[in-house]
Each structure stands twice: as C-alpha cells, then as structure tokens.
Amino acid sequence: MAVAIERGLSGMMVVDRESTTSTSSRERGKVVGMTTSRDLLRVMHAGFKEGKTADELVKVTVKEFMTPLSQVIYARPEETIGTCRIIMAKLGVKCLPILSHGRVEGLITARDISEYSLEAREGVSAKGGKKNYLKHVSERVGLSVNTSMAEPPAYLKAQLALEQNPLFINVGVAEMPHPFKTPESCGMNARDHGPNDHSTDTDLSEDAYFVCEVNLPDDAAEGEVGTYKHLTYMGVADGVGSWREYGVDPREFSHRLMDECEHILKEASENAREDADRHRIIAPAEVLAQAYERVKAANIIGSSTACVALFDNARHQLHFSNLGDSGIIVLRHIDSDVAGSLKRDRTTPRADRKSDLRVAFVSQQQLRSFNHPYQFGWTGEELKDDESSFKTAADSCTTSIHIRRGDIIIMATDGLFDNVDIDDIAKVALEWEQKNGFIRGGDIAAREKRWSMGNSMSVQSCETLPELAQTLCEKARENSLDSSVDSPFAILAKENDIMWSGGMPDDCTVVAMHVVGRRSDDVLDRSNN
C-alpha cells in the first residue's frame, strides 16, 4: 500500500521470487497475479466491515486479495493505444500488463493513456508549469458554497430503471442423436446404417448441455451486505466424433466438460454463502477455463466445441463465450415501420406481412477451415503446435448482448445450424408463439398492452418451451435426411469447392430460451394464465 501511494501506482504485478518460470528454466521470478489500487480499497472495505483495525489491515498478505493469474486481462506490445483504451472501457479496468513471449514487459494505465493523448495534442510541455496551471487549472479550483447535485443523467436513470424492472428467462431443452448412430458405431449414411430405425437414444449423443441457476454476490453492489443476484447459466458442447477412430469415446470429453461447468457454478454459489467478498459472478469464459483445466487434470482424452452463456436479469444482458461452431441466435419482434434499414423487410408489403420477428443477433463461429472448428481438447499432454485446432477459453469469441422482453434465444450445437436456415428457425419460433398466444397476428401493441396489465404468460412459456426445442431438433433431423434440398452445410461446402448435397446428419442439442417479465413460479402471473 505504501509503495502504491508513494509512487502513484495504479497496479503492480505480484511475483514469487522463489519459483522458476518453468520446469526447464532457471530464471526465478514467476508472476502469480496482479494487484491494483481498486483491490487495496476492496480489502480495506472488507476489513472495516469485519471490524478489523488499521494495524490488522496492513498485515494482510497480497495473495489474499490479488487478482489471480488466470483472471488477469493483458495487452500485447503490437496493439495500439486505442485498442487498450477500448479494452479498459469495456471491462472497467484501469491497468493492463503488457505481455510478450510469456514475459510481462510493463504496465499501461489509464493515466498513461491520458498523458499520451495530452502530449500528442499539445506537445510534451503540456504538463506542469505555471503557464499550464494558469491556462487550465486556476479558473477551475474551488466550488461555490451553494453548489448542488444535478439530477442523474438519462443513461443512469435508464440503468436504475432496468434494475427495478428485472427480466426473467424460461429454458427448454431437447436433444436428438445422429440418426445413424448405434452403441457400436455411427454410420455415414443410410446404407451404412442398414434397415434399422433411426436412432432416438439420447445417451448415444456426443452433444452435452447444462442449465444451472445460482445465487452469487453482485459485483456492482459492493458494500451492500447480502446483495445477491439470481443468475442463470447454460451451455452446450459437441464432442468431436473422429476420436472414435482412435478407440476413444467422443462423449466422455464433452459430457465431462459440461458437468464440470455446472459443478464450478454450484461450488461458487455454496462458497459465496461463507465468504461473499471472495466469490463474485463468474464470467462464462472463466467457467469454461476452469472446467477445461479440471477435464485435463482428470486426463479425459478427446475434444469438443463449447458455448457457455450467462443471463443477467437485472441488467437485461446475455454474456457468452463460444469456441467452435456451436452458437447463439436472438430473435426479436421489430416493427418494420420504425426499424432501421438493416432490420426492415423491404420486399413484402406491410399489409401482407404476418410477422416482424427478426434475427437480432447471430454469434460468430470459429473455424480453422471448413467443417474443422476450433475446440477444447486433450491428448494426454500439452501440444506446443500453434497450428493445432486445440484452443483455450482465452481464444473464445466472448460477447455481451442487450436482451429485451419477449426475445427468443436459441443456443444450439452445429446439428441445428448446419441443417436449418436461420430464417426457418425464426419461422418455427413464430409458429410456437402464435400457437401459445404470445403474439397474435404480429400485433406487437397488443402484446405490450397485455404486459402492462401484468400478464406475462410466463407459466405457459415455461411449460411449452421444451416443445419449441423439440420441434427444432426434429426439423434439423428431417432436413439432415433430405437429399433433395441443400442445407446450410451443403451450401457452405460448395462455396469451399466440396461437392455435398442435402443435409448433414449429426447429433443435435437445442436450448431454447424465452425472456419474460415474471418468474414462472410468480403467483400473480400464474393467476393471469
């Protein structure tokens, strides 16, 4: 603490001088974490709340409150100041270590960026001196005794309003195995499968999933005792079937990865009850990173793509991390009379349109090449090849999306997206909405009126969502067996000079979500259904 104050430091790397950087290196000074001025304030706050004295606080060791190495966000020397500023703004951090070839070369702070910008604009003499004080500071020192606080700005009021009007999410899951799969093998086509019926045993599927609801302390409510957030995590994984050629069951890796994700979240929820200051909301990428390490520690051979998401009901956001070709789409009713040009249906006359359900978001796939996704994997030892298909959670596509009431979110493995066009997924979702009365004739105004009267239809949504997920799985299977119509997989194959017609038989897992205004166990909402 004394060093940080005396030298005006925003952050410091924590180094263990007794440890070597690797088993083959004699170089001592292994980086084990990072501590910032915010960490110091946090430990002081926690200590005073527990009744500790100032003398006791200054004896707290750094390892008790530092940011562990696995959670440190870093930049690279070749990245620009602008990139660092964007990372800091998005993640709410003020200090980034600069990593080059496994070594921390230095730190860049918000103050460094501010000073650089000032010098770039006004020259190196822009800081300090009497001239600069008179020009920039003298007329800004001191506030009038009659100074008062203004009303919160509009964006802050909007944020506060979100927290007072939380959204909730209902989840329905369905899965279906590869149609030509048996306990002994998996046929490439109907000829390989023979006269047997198409497979329906989900235990044969190499896909895996989890859905987990937990209560974790709210980072944004620091200092408020007992402030917890109810969070819903969900994830899907798709085991890589080619491991079967090496005598490895492709199901083991993907299923263990999802099991570990769920275990990590439940452990965090339990531990938070004992020490809320040490256990905060876990980002999807961190869940995947920890789960991956546990799978490797258990020596589970295999590989899998994976996507894990977190729904934040207070801030109306979906955070997710995706590695490979599983993914997420968000469907939203957008009135084309007021929508921007990118979302407007320009081809169908307004009177003839049956719906304004649009694709509001599609996650990005990560492929090394066609039909060759990046994946989490383990062969029994670490691979040093940079060209390997095996990646880590740090390489995943990590994004946050603003979610609105009434949105339908589909998380699925590639068995769905390879066989069902996104617009067709939207049509299936619309049919589900209309069948259950969530939307009638595309009338968004009528739905808004129903909501204003307190009728969220959350119970019906919860009870019928598995039907939507099942319908999408069945649609994927139907298309995968249809050789007369090119699937999205076949279209992409031909774009890559690969002759492929019809669908792509595969395992399929769908996690369907519906954003509602009340919990499904809400007594008031149940009385309205």
Image (cartoon, rainbow, N blue to C red):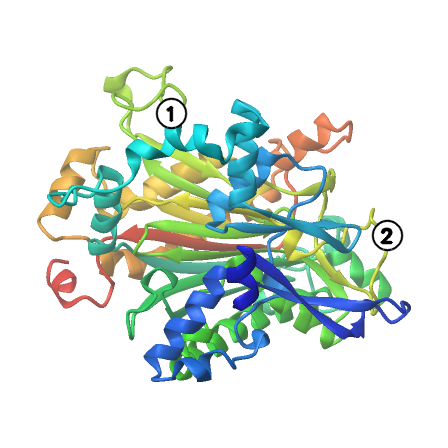
Hey, which quadrant is residue 23 in on the image? bottom right
Q: Is residue 263 visible?
A: yes
Q: Which mark is residue 385?
A: 2
On the image, the x and y values in percent for residue 449 come to: 11, 41
Q: Is residue 255 or residue 489 the one in the foreground? A: 255
Left or right: residue 417 compared with residue 234: right
- Few, some or many C-alpha atoms within 10 Å of disc 1 (few <14, some 14-19, many ≥20)? some
Local secondary structure at mark 1:
loop
Instruction: Specify the amino acid type for callout 2.
Output: Asp
- Few, some or many C-alpha atoms within 10 Å of disc 2 (few <14, some 14-19, many ≥20)? few
Report the residue at 26% width, 27% height from top.
335
Task: Write down the residue under mark 1.
Answer: 343
Report the residue at 30% width, 61% height from top.
463
Q: Is residue 388 or residue 235 the one in the foreground? A: 388
Instruction: Specify the amino acid type for callout 1.
Output: Lys
Local secondary structure at mark 2:
loop
The image shows residue 509, relative to residue 421, as above or below, that is below
Looking at the rendered image, the disc whose residue lies closer to the viewer, 2 or 1, is: 2
Q: Is residue 359 or residue 349 the one in the foreground? A: 359
